[in-house]
Image: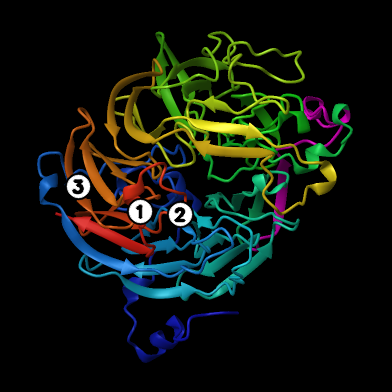
């Protein structure tokens, strides 16, 4: 069992450890009730509540007094060791339970920090997972947070392990090598549901096959696994026309990864996850067909992993428009009828409403400024216009079709969206959803790869991509009932961090190191500060002794400057910042 050099047990023996450390466990009941007044001071799951609203009722900080915000404290974090793709991205959402914060670095290492004083973040333990930080690893490093389950803190690691650390000591309670094929691993935060922990295989673009699994929270033993690319003979396998290519095994490297934490509906015991693009991403002729269950919302029974329903946003995708992003669970009146809704800002530039009970399409609306890959969404089916269910390869817009014998195409929105994996948010009191978007286009080309040259565990694009000029961003306010944009605040830099809603404020971090608060009604910026790093993580908020704090992590730029030379020299330092009035 690995532990920090000075254990909590040793401190307890000397009488130097406060009994305040021994907080109540994160029981299933607490997690289900994370949105109640009793838990208003806490942030117990990665999206705060199972419905993924990322909305906090804390309202000490308002549009009127936000100008008085100041830095309460900062904590340097580790994990700056690079892989072959460079420094890892800080994309984690800190959790807070009873004055203790839990945060990860890009390697999935978990830090427990005492934030109860409001003036300093004191690291209590660092859970040593002994991960091999080999700089030659061909993985894109990122980690989006932990799950609290009972008395353990659970982290997913890029090497495919799931690790549970003791909440009191930081000692490892159990670890499981859950991902066991070349190239498989994790970046998304796990989700604790009842006596299980849900994890999603993240590295689909590395020529792997996506899956979602449930583990026993007490032992880490696997309970069930659902593959997002079906094998021949399973439902959905008929949409992978591998035999037509002379490569009948193309499904084995088909992607459709689940690399962002899903949502959970306790009433129906249903998990709703988004899935990634089919692989190779830019060569549909390698894997013709609709490629289920890529680019989809999938609903799974939380006890068994059985598929309840699915909705595929972009069949046969060749733009890298995977739809792993947040699926908001909303009860909303639409066209005079109360509906159980799944709302989703699609990476493909449309906002979708689906029926949560069966996955049927309700409505959709465009939220990005430029969109050319299709002429719209069919109002009856929700499929892109010009979708042909009998076609081997889709051609949604005549001038924006990727083929091996064609030249480059300019696709809008950008291949990263729209809104990619970073979280969106929803205010149940106003019915408004918010997102932080990329505004721009990219240029894509197909570069065929022979099946014998494909290496599982190496990134498999089947083409190339580049930014089409300078890429900008926007903060979007959208009416969920109609799927239509209400307000939009254009920003100089593309969105890459996600949003937090607290009271009447929208909080956004940006690539140039600016962290800002915006009036949720008008989208007017009411406060900002520049901290010099790069924000690729969403903010969160919590309270201690009735005082509200807002926290966010910062790190290196990593993903490129999107045509903005002024931020190209941004240096990497993994930091936690906490603000208060």
Q: CA distance from mark 2 to mark 1?
A: 9 Å
- Marks 3/2 in contact by CB < 8 Å: the verdict is no
Magenta-span inclusion, residue 442: no
If the image is split into quadrants, where does the N terminus sit? bottom right
Query: Which numbered disc covers residue 528?
Result: 3
Would you name the residue on which mark 1 appears?
534
| 260 left or right of 476 in image | right
Where disc 2 sits, the SS reads loop
* Quadrant position of residue 527: top left
Picture coordinates of residue 53, whole percent (x, y): 39, 37
Tell me where the magenta segment starts and ends, as one range. 219-243
Does any portion of residue 167 appear in the rendered image?
Answer: yes
Alpha carbon of mark 3 to alpha carbon of mark 2: how far? 23 Å
Q: Residue at x 57, y 79 (%)?
A: 2
- Helix, strand or loop status at disc 1: loop
Q: Nearer the viewer, mark 3 or mark 1?
A: 1
Mark closer to the observer (3, 2): 2
């Amino acid at each position: 069992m690995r532990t920090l050099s000075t254990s909590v047990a040793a401190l307890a023996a000397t009488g130097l450890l406060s009994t305040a450390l021994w907080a109540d466990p994160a029981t299933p009941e607490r997690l289900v009730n994370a949105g109640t007044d009793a838990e208003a001071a806490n942030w117990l799951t990665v999206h705060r509540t199972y419905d993924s609203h990322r909305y906090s009722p804390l309202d000490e900080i308002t549009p009127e007094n936000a100008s008085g915000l100041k830095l309460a404290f900062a904590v340097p974090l580790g994990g700056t060791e690079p892989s072959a793709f460079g420094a890892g991205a800080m994309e984690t959402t800190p959790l807070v339970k009873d004055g203790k914060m839990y945060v990860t670095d890009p390697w999935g290492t978990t830090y427990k920090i005492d934030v109860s004083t409001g003036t300093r973040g004191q690291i209590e333990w660092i859970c040593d997972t002994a991960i091999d930080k080999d700089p030659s690893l061909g993985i894109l490093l990122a980690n989006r947070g932990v799950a609290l389950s009972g008395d353990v803190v659970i982290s997913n690691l890029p090497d495919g392990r799931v690790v549970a650390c003791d909440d009191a000591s930081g000692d490892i309670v159990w670890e499981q090598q859950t991902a066991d094929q070349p190239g498989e691993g994790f970046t998304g935060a796990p989700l604790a549901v009842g006596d299980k922990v849900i994890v999603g295989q993240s590295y689909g673009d590395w020529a792997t096959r996506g899956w979602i699994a449930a583990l026993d929270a007490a032992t880490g033993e696997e309970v069930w696994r659902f593959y997002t690319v079906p094998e021949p003979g399973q439902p959905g396998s008929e949409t992978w026309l591998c035999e037509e290519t002379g490569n009948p095994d193309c499904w084995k490297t088909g992607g459709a990864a689940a690399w962002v934490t899903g949502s959970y509906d306790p009433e129906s015991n249903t998990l709703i996850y988004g899935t990634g693009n089919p692989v190779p991403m830019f060569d549909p002729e390698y894997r013709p067909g609709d490629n289920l269950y890529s680019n989809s919302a999938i609903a799974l029974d939380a006890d068994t992993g059985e598929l309840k329903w699915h909705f595929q946003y972009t069949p046969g995708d060749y733009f890298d428009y995977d739809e792993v992003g947040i699926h908001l669970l909303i009860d909303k009146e639409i066209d005079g009828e109360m509906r159980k809704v799944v709302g989703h800002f699609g990476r493909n530039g449309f906002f979708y409403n689906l029926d949560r009970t069966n996955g049927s399409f309700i409505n959709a609306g465009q939220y990005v400024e430029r969109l050319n890959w299709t002429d719209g969404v069919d109002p009856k089916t929700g499929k892109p216009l010009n979708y042909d269910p009998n076609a081997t390869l889709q051609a949604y817009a005549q001038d924006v079709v990727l083929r091996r014998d064609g030249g480059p195409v300019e696709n809008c929105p950008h291949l990263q969206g729209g809104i990619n994996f970073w979280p969106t948010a929803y205010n149940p009191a106003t019915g408004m959803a918010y997102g932080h978007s990329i505004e721009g286009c990219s240029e894509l080309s197909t570069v065929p790869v022979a099946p014998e040259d494909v290496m599982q565990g190496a990134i498999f694009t089947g083409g190339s991509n580049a930014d089409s000029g300078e890429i900008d961003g926007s903060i979007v306010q959208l009416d969920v009932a109609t799927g239509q944009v209400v307000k939009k605040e254009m920003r100089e830099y593309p969105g890459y961090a996600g949003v937090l809603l607290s009271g009447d404020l929208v909080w956004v971090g940006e690539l140039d190191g600016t962290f800002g608060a915006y009036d949720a009604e008008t989208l007017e910026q009411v406060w900002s500060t520049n901290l010099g790093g790069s924000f690729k993580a969403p903010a969160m908020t919590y309270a201690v002794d009735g005082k509200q704090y807002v926290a966010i992590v910062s790190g290196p730029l990593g993903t490129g400057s999107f045509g903005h030379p002024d931020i190209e020299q941004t240096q990497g330092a993994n930091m936690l910042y906490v603000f208060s009035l």
